[in-house]
Amino acid sequence: MMKTTLGIILFVLAGSALAQAPAPVGNAQAAKSKISMCTGCHGIPGYKTVYPHVYHVPMITGQQPVYIVNALQAYKSGARSHPSMRGVAQSLSDQDMADLAAYYSSEPK
Amino acid sequence: MKTALLIALTIFASQLAYAGVDRAAGASKSKPCAVCHGADFNTPISADIPRLAGQHADYLARALTDYKSGARKNPVMDGQAAALSPQDIQDIAAYVSSLNGNLKVIRLHRLVH
């Protein structure tokens, strides 16, 4: 009985600890398998998006890491709208976003 | 007849001048932006604020236009962009995009090969 109670308490504690897990730490190396969906637009000098407006896609290499994560989260939630960026961001986990931010904010090799 | 043509041309030319982008004016209009984005627009005061130096002018103009219309939202930028005219936005975008900074494009072929 005592053991069961202790077990339940530990289980609940572990659950709440997981729920409050800190933001994942980005790994630039891990991003290398995830950047293919970015480079198709952001890796082409002079590339323009055409819908819903025509303009050059922003340069993201050298950008600030927290800004990159915030932008991706905003696209994912729909707070920031761009059809193709929403599609891309919806496929990304928090860890993916952290890895991509680490990659693009550093000096990619 | 010649006079009429001359007048028409003068009006046309003045409209072109009016519609032109003024990078020098953008330098002074962008002073409030530099408070957060950095005097060189490459050293923002925190990591959640983007570098802008050298960014594409049409992208910068799109961002400011979207903040102004409410299509894009940010607690600080909403208020900043609301005060800007379309001419201000073009001028600021032209100036900021002319600066040198860390932003660049890593070419696709470098990743493929």
Image: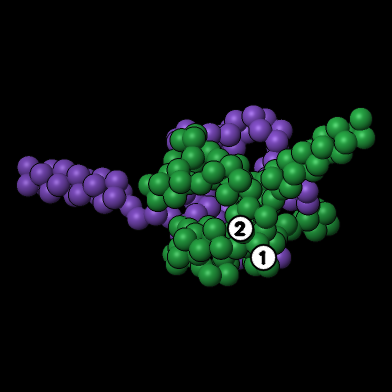
Chain colours: A purple, B green
Is residue A31 rendered to the left or right of residue A93?
A: right
> Which amino acid, by three-letter code, is at mark 1?
Leu
* Count of numbered circles in the view: 2
Q: Position of residue A43 (x, y in %)?
A: 74, 50
Q: Residues within 10 Å of mark 2 (few under 14, many from 20)?
A: many
| Along the line of sight, the residue nearer the viewer: A51 or A64 | A51
Q: Chain of mark 2?
A: B
Say which quarter of the image contains residue B19: top right
Which numbered disc covers residue B26?
2
Describe residue A108's horizontal placement relative to residue A87 as left or right.
right
Residue that mark 1 sits on: B99
Mark seen at residue A63: none
Q: Which image quadrant: the N terminus of chain A?
A: top left
Label 1 – label 2 distance at C-alpha: 12 Å
Disc 2 residue type? Answer: Gly
Horizontal placement of A34 versus B109: left or right? left
The reply to the same-chain question for discs 1 and 2 is: yes
Quarter of the image that includes the C terminus of chain A: bottom right
At x 81%, y 41%, the residue is B10
**Residue A39 pos. (x, y %):** 71, 48
- The answer to which of A63 and B33 lies nearer the viewer is B33
Which secondary structure lies at badge 2? Answer: helix
* Residue B100 vs residue A17, the one in the foreground: B100
